[in-house]
Structures are given as structure tokens and as C-alpha cells.
Image: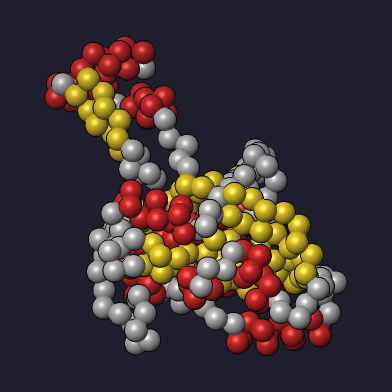
Amino acid sequence: MTDHLVKATVEGVRIFAAVTTNLVGEAVKRHDCYPVAAAALGRTMTGALLFAANLKNEEAVTIKIQGDGPLGKIVADAVPEGFSRGYVDNPHVDLPLNSKGKIDVAGGVGRNGLVTVTRFTGLKKNITGTAEIATGEIAEDLTNYLFVSEQTPSSIGLGVLVDTDLSIKAAGGFFIQPLPNASEDTIDRLEGSLTNIQSVTDLVAGNLDAKGIISRIFDGFDINFLSTTDLNFRCQCSRQRIEEVLTSLSKDDLQSLIDDGKAEVACQFCGQKYQFNKSELEKIMNNG
């Protein structure tokens, strides 16, 4: 199944659902993530894509989650066109399963810290909001962020299933937001449905696509499907951008690289490595 996101409305409720197995798998492979980091990064990237679905074209969102756990900072970018990238500071964190026998994402994230969401809207000043980490489970933290920072009651579900060979077997999520015209009856029915719904990983691993996830959650509702967007892992890094980073270094730092005779710079978001020889470094120095 290719990765995709579906938008729909249901009786005064907005819903986005996404299957992100392949793009999460690509990110996990690039960063050599162990299970805790894989689950945390995959949930954050999926969350970013769900947040970006409500943006206009050429806008973007960045989600940063930084608690006091061993994973350190988790960052994901996404755009409404369907592209995402991300990284985690410490991808090799290894923790025992939690009390429920699940990957201990909350233990990896920690509790003391912040969720920061920045929306890049093309205005002179970007829009940034923060909220304290609620549980470290990421979906609950993003739901809490929307309620605390943006006063928007919502429900978010995220899941990543890591296979025994550390590949990603299933990943996806949903984002549900009642609109002002949603009736109390609709909200009550929805809350009952969410209480009984399977986990996101079970839904995706059961080969449900995004429409199937929405249909399962809103069983018995009149669903209005709006659009489908293909999703992919994509990084905005390039050799030119890395050169700009090198240009911003001090003369002493650049000279040190020149003395070494070469430099290798890796993109933090995708792991792509860029090589520069001595003459290229000298040219950067002279043009800086």
C-alpha cells in the first residue's frame, strides 16, 4: 500500500487519516533507529503530516518534542503537499517494554519538557505555540497541545509497529476535530466509537487504508470523503544549501577544514552526506 492521507467530514466533524508505513520506514532506515526511537520518530512525522493537512499550499509545519528522556529532541517537518522528514537526537536508545508489553515511547521521551509547533505561513513572523509534555506518548501530547495552546478540542491517534528486523511493519494516524456546528449527539457517538476502536497500528497492520480507518471510526455515520494526497519522505537539503552552511562558518573553522584537505557534512534530517575537497573548500572561503 502506498502512503496516503485522506480528508473527510462527518456531521460537523473534520477528520484526516493517514497511512505512513513507507515514509516512516525510510526515515528509520536512514537514521538507524532502534525500536523506541523508531516509534517516537514515526509518530511525530505522522503527526506533522496530519497537522500540515490543514495548511495551505507552500506553507509548512515543524513539530519539536523535547523531554528529559534519553531520546532527546524529536523533530519532524511536513508540508500539505504530502512530504515529511524528521530526526531524533539519540536513535540508538534501547529500553525494556513498558507495563503493557509495548515499546516504551513515553520512557524515551520523558515527562519534563515541551511540545513546540511552528507554522510557516509565508508571513513575516512564523506562528509558534508550546505546551508542556503531557504523557510522552506523543499522540496525547499533540492532543493536549491543541487544547492548551490553540484552544482546539481534538482527538489524535498515532501508531508505529516495529518488526523484529527493526523495519516498519505499519504506521499511520488520525486527526479528529469537531467543528462549531457539531451536535452534542455526534460528539457523544464519536466518543463512544473512539473508546472501542482498535489501535492505529492494528488498523494499518490489518491492511486498512486511510478511508478504511475513517470508516471504522465513523461506523454508522454519513461520511463525506473530500480528497486523497500521496505521502512521501522528502528532505529539502541540497549541496547548495550545505555550501551556504559552510559559508556561514568562521574563517578559522573553514581554514581548519582546508588544512584537513576535505570535509564531509551530513544532513541532520535525512542523513545524506556531502563531500567537499580542498579546492572546493578554498573556493567557499574565497567567495564567503
**Looking at the image, which residue is at 36% across and 13% down?**
287
In screen coordinates, is 122 left or right of 278? right
Q: Camera-side residue: 164 or 136?
A: 164
In screen coordinates, is 117 left or right of 168? right
In screen coordinates, is 258 left or right of 200? left
**Looking at the image, which residue is at 34% across and 60% down?**
167
- The quarter of the displayed image where residue 146 is located: bottom right
For residue 46, above or below residue 125:
below
For residue 180, above or below residue 80:
below
**Looking at the image, which residue is at 24% across and 31% down?**
264
**Looking at the image, which residue is at 57% across and 68% down?**
208
Give the image location of residue 237, x and y in percent: 43, 35
Number of numbered discs on residues: 0
Q: Say whether residue 24 is visible.
A: yes
Give the image location of residue 60, x and y in percent: 59, 46
Quadrant containing the C terminus in the rendered view: top left
State the colouring used for the structure image.
Answer: secondary structure
- The quarter of the displayed image where residue 67 is located: bottom left
Q: Camera-side residue: 15 or 288?
A: 15
- The quarter of the displayed image where residue 213 is located: bottom right
Give the image location of residue 220, x and y in percent: 76, 81
Q: Say whether residue 61 is visible.
A: no
Q: Camera-side residue: 207 or 71?
A: 207
